[in-house]
Image (spheres, rainbow, N blue to C red):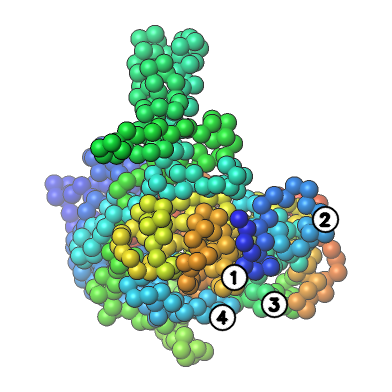
């Protein structure tokens, strides 16, 4: 900063000044006024201008945050090395394919038996359209993307306690819920019960809108007719020739719908992070990891287990050992250290940072998420049920079934996501089962939604993230209270050490969080180095 | 719909009126998405704790570690074990919102008297409650 006068000050520098002087909220307001912060803090490729004077950075962890930093810092002239615990790069950006083996904590080893070309993403599996950081690196590194289907109107909603345990089509639950609510509101409006809240003029518009939104008839009723069936589907679809006329279907009763709690699943796709369009890399999420690895693999030391991180006025020394040759301490040194080690692990490593950062490291628990991939002999969900991609939701412990969003119409075998629970009791209880029991439980639960499971199931593999040796959990499980107390301390530069990863972001559990946190960290580090 | 694939994996869809003998068995796993349903220390350990501390309490080591509970002197201080279960710290997630006070006490007492531990000063639900 000192080299530059006001006339050459760029927008990024202005923001840095505002951020330093007035804190993040003021910076966000300034960014908004400059039109930058509408969706993401990613504003295009990072520019680390200025001479790094050969400074060195030791990066701990070769997940996305570590590899983004390695790639950008080397480009900016830094000397970079990366230590990684696993024998592969990518971290949680990971896919399992036939022939892969996975050994979880406790020693159970699963061999993935999927057929060639089939895969399952145990970690992240979708990329929202506004995750500009992930999308931009995919563009830079030519990672091919295809649509990820979040909402499928023909997928199932299932509750053990509703409709005699019979799954209902998402389309019908949504149409009927909206239709009944629209009818109720129209009634309240017509009976002048909304006079205090809505002007008479607006009430007319409201009635028109309710009729339009809820598929109501000319009497503002939601019932068995072709208007409602255009939303919920027909008993007999429109056809051709003499078989042309459709037969309307009968809506579910309002009370049954309310008590089913199935409306809980209707809003998922309305949330910002799950809105259409979402993407997935063609061939598996780890195509992103592989693309980054191609850029920086020469910088990565694999099988390196970090045991101590020490800093003094002269630099940082990290003690580690080769996982294949334990007990022999090795050392790596640098001017700076960017540590992306997940907090459950970092909290157990000797590190001489201040109390405020140490408390932050120790405070954040990690979610127990469990995912299970199942291979079936054929795509019965497509062939029998007309479900192409998307997600069915259930109140059973598996919580959801995610159908493959690729290869539609293929007549061979296929893999679906047979269970995904992130935070609740079921995730812990799945973790406590053996891998074989988890798969058996997923098949048992899924049979309530797809009776074909029993006949068509072939094999499965599970990842319970609390048992993942290189993370000890799925993602930082922040609360608002925890963020108030610890977030800024976690992200601050402590001497020569700073942290990055999804845990140091407000996109917890998302790859975008890992990338944005890393870019934010190296931007601040670079300014510190230039100010040197 | 509940075709059982293993005996241990019974769906406990409805828990109302469950006889107390069954309420002590591990079959209450997967009973409720926001509260653990097993009640005894042994059943809770099998449903929850062994996910990380392993069935025999030996813990596990990877890039980080889950401490072994076998012959663990840190369990001598009952308050430490209680606080870890309720509030968590480092790799240990807080389980206080998923367990009631009786369950917290039961699982702490179980761990402190098994896996080679023999700490006979029992904690109570009141002790657990005091930590919330």
Name the residue tied to disc 2: B20
Give the mark nearer the N terminus: 2 vs 3. Answer: 2
Name the residue tied to disc 3: B56
Residue at position x 37%, y 56% in the image:
A382
- Name the one closer to the observer, A275 or A476: A275
Residue at position x 39%, y 29% in the image:
A228
Report in which chain the residue with disc 3 lies: B
Q: Which mark is residue A218?
A: none
Q: Position of residue A201 (x, y in %)?
A: 35, 9
User: For the residues marked 3 and 1, what is the alpha-carbon distance in whole angstroms?
Assistant: 18 Å
Q: Position of residue B76 (x, y in %)?
A: 78, 70
Q: Position of residue A415 (x, y in %)?
A: 40, 66
Q: Secondary structure at mark 3?
A: loop
Tag 3 near tag 1, CB within 8 Å: no
Name the residue tied to disc 4: A107
Left or right of residue A130, residue A261 in this image: right
């Amino acid at each position: 900063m000192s080299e530059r006068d006001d006339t050459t000050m760029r927008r990024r520098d202005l923001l840095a000044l505002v951020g330093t002087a007035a804190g993040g909220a003021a910076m966000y307001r300034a960014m908004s006024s400059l039109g930058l912060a509408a969706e993401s803090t990613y504003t295009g490729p990072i520019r680390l201008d200025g001479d790094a004077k050969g400074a060195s950075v030791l990066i701990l962890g070769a997940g996305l945050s570590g590899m983004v930093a390695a790639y950008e810092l080397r480009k900016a002239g830094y000397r970079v090395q990366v230590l990684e615990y696993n024998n592969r790069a990518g971290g949680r950006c990971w896919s399992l394919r036939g022939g892969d083996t996975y050994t979880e904590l406790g020693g159970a080893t699963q061999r993935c038996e999927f057929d060639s070309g089939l895969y399952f993403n145990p970690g992240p599996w979708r990329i929202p359209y506004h995750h500009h950081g992930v999308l931009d690196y995919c563009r830079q590194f030519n990672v091919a993307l295809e649509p990820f289907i979040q909402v499928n109107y023909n997928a199932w909603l299932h509750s053990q306690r509703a409709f005699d345990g019979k799954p209902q089509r998402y389309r019908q639950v949504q149409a009927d819920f909206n239709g009944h609510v629209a009818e109720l509101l129209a009634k309240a409006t017509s009976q002048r019960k909304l006079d205090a809240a809505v002007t008479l003029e607006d009430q007319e518009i409201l009635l028109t809108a309710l009729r339009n939104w809820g598929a109501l008839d000319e009497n503002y009723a939601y019932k068995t007719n072709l208007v409602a069936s255009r939303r919920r589907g027909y008993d007999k679809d429109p056809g051709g020739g003499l078989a042309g006329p459709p037969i309307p279907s009968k809506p579910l009763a309002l009370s049954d719908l309310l008590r089913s709690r199935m409306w809980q699943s209707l809003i998922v796709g309305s949330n910002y992070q799950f809105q259409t369009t979402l993407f997935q890399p063609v061939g598996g999420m780890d195509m992103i990891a592989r693309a980054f690895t191609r850029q920086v693999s020469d910088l990565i030391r694999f099988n390196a287990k970090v045991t101590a991180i020490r800093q003094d006025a002269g630099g940082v020394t990290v003690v580690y050992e080769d996982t294949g040759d334990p007990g022999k301490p090795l050392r790596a040194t640098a001017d700076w250290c960017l540590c992306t080690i997940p907090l459950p692990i970092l909290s157990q490593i000797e590190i001489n940072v201040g109390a405020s950062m140490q408390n932050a490291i120790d405070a954040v628990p990690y979610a127990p998420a469990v995912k299970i991939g199942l291979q079936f002999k054929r795509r019965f969900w497509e062939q029998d049920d007309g479900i192409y991609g998307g997600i069915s939701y259930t109140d059973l412990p598996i919580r959801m079934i995610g159908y493959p969003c690729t290869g539609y119409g293929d007549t061979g075998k296929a893999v679906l996501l047979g269970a995904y629970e992130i935070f609740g009791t079921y995730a812990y209880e799945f973790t406590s089962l053996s891998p074989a029991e988890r798969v058996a439980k997923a098949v048992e639960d899924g049979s309530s939604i797809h009776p074909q499971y029993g006949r068509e199931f072939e094999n499965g593999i599970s990842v319970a993230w609390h048992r993942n040796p290189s993370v000890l959990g799925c993602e930082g499980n922040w609360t608002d209270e925890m963020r108030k107390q610890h977030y800024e301390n976690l992200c601050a530069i402590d001497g020569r050490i700073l942290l990055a990863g999804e845990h140091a972001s407000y996109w917890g559990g998302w790859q975008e969080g890992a990338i944005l946190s890393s870019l934010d960290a190296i931007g601040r580090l670079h300014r510190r180095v230039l100010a040197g | 719909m509940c075709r059982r694939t293993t005996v241990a994996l019974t769906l406990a869809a409805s828990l109302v009126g469950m006889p107390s003998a069954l309420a002590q068995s591990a079959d209450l796993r997967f009973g409720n998405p926001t509260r653990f349903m097993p009640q005894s220390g042994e059943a809770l350990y099998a449903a929850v704790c062994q996910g990380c501390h392993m069935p025999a309490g030996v813990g596990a080591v990877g890039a980080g570690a889950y401490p072994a509970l076998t012959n663990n002197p840190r369990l001598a201080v009952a308050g430490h074990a209680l606080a870890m279960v309720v509030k968590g710290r480092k790799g240990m997630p807080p389980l206080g919102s998923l367990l009631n006070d009786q369950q917290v006490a039961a699982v702490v007492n179980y761990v402190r008297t098994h896996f080679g531990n023999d700490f006979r000063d029992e904690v109570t639900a009141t002790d657990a409650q005091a930590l919330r």
